[in-house]
Amino acid sequence: MTQRALPASIPVDSGRICAELQELAAFTGGEPPGVTRVVFTHADRDARQWLAAKCREAGLETREDGVGNFFARWVGSDARLPAVGTGSHTDAIPNSGIYDGTVGVLGGLEAIRALRESGFVPKRSIELLMFTSEEPTRFGIGCLGSRLLSGRACIESVDRLRDGDGGSARDAARAAGFDGDLESVRIAPDHYGHFVELHIEQGPLLEREGIPIGIVTAIAAPASLRVAFAGEGGHAGTVLMPDRRDALTAAAELALEVERAGRESESPDTVATTGVFRPFPGAVNSIPSRCELEIDVRDTSEGSRDGAVARIVSAARRIADARSVAVEIETVNSDPPAVCDPTVVAAIRGAVAAEGLSAREMVSRAYHDSLFMATLTRTAMIFIPCRGGISHRPEEYASPGDIRAGVAVLARTLAALSSSQAGE
Ligand code: HGY
Ligand code: MN
Ligand code: MN
């Protein structure tokens, strides 16, 4: 479909979407200005109800699956064809920003409203998704909803996941009002023909180069480990140094090794982070008997990523031996990178040209639900700049102009893909 069938200017109402982003930010479990919206908490459930009402107001057919993935469908003139999907997440890690994920969900809704207001009629249905639990905060694994939807998650391993209170994902979904039937979440492989996600870059390149649109061609491969050291513990005043088996100092040594594994990798794209560090019992006059770490390792190359993981695992074992403490190592996830689809990339490029914008192709170092949608259907992403590349912090910011440009490019991309013939 050529872009000419659309109006010269897509009527994106940037005032409306920016106001909605602020409204959505008010659903938080923490202190403003940061946003905290952990999956299945009250803030998350209130946000979901608000979003569903917005989508119904826009004339979309809505539904939720057993784990809380949310769908809002604009039925096309030939609804038998595989649909075009768009969307992202609205859950937010503690004390984060208001744009991560939400720009893709509200941007998708605004793109659909703008197309409807411009009189466009899609051949293929266009379906907005809000994926449940993209962030790993509660259950330790990212993209839980899109893993299940795409069939990439093993149900048995999901049933072994536990939150900080020892609750399972299935029970938490049920407590939040979903049926918890994880087995029914997987969607038919031909349900979607294409998927496009709009997201802030969460990095500095677009702003630094003064380019309004990023066309994502690949998504880095994430892995995460859970490591627990167990020592002797004891009284901080009476156990002399040679007699100690301190779990925290063993964990501290490993955290520094994680950093070295990232810094000393041959690949400049390897990143390694100890994001969670939990000593027990956490009393100043008690030698820690246990210390848990959660470690995040990524690279655009799966081989480089796996090399860094292997170095960290062998270091954990070496440190445990040297300090006579026990160690448990669990791989929570180890996912391949995603290569974005050329058809969808070309549609985004055509939309950028129709909007008279500049763009650059780039890799996403953050993971997104698109990482798993790419295993299900033809997928690509659209990035917009965020100030200073800052994300996962209250200072996260995307300008109304950049949001508008991203939504207009998304709208044109959805129009092009939803007009394509079967098999195109
Ligand atoms: O961690 C990530 O890459 C994503 O923001 N959840
Ligand atoms: Mn995030
Ligand atoms: Mn995100």
Image: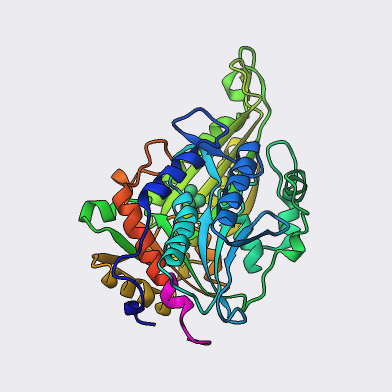
Dividing the picture into quadrants, the one containing residue 181 is bottom right
Query: Front-most of 234 and 193?
Result: 193
At x 57%, y 61%, the residue is 59
Q: Is residue 345 above or below residue 368?
A: below
- Asked whether, in this view, residue 180 is left or right of residue 414, the answer is right
Q: Which residues are magenta?
A: 414-424
Q: Is residue 424 above or below residue 42?
A: below
- Asked whether, in this view, residue 87 is left or right of residue 212, the answer is right
Residue found farthest to the top: 237
At x 55%, y 79%, the residue is 77
- Asked whether, in this view, residue 363 is left or right of residue 161, the answer is left
Q: At which x and y percent is residue 103? A: 44, 52
Query: Front-most of 374 and 347?
Result: 347
Q: At which x and y percent is residue 329? A: 63, 49
Q: At which x and y percent is residue 298? A: 46, 56
Number of numbered discs visible in the structure rendering: 0
Dividing the picture into quadrants, the one containing residue 176 is top right
Colour approach in the figure: rainbow
Q: Could you tell me if residue 29 is visible in this image?
A: yes
Residue 256 colored in magenta in the image: no
The quarter of the picture where the N terminus appears is: bottom left
Q: Could you tell me if residue 325 is visible in this image?
A: no
Query: Front-most of 98 and 49?
Result: 49
Q: Is residue 308 above or below residue 152?
A: above
Query: Front-most of 181 and 267?
Result: 181
At x 28%, y 55%, the residue is 205
Residue 419 colored in magenta in the image: yes
Q: At which x and y percent is residue 154? A: 70, 63
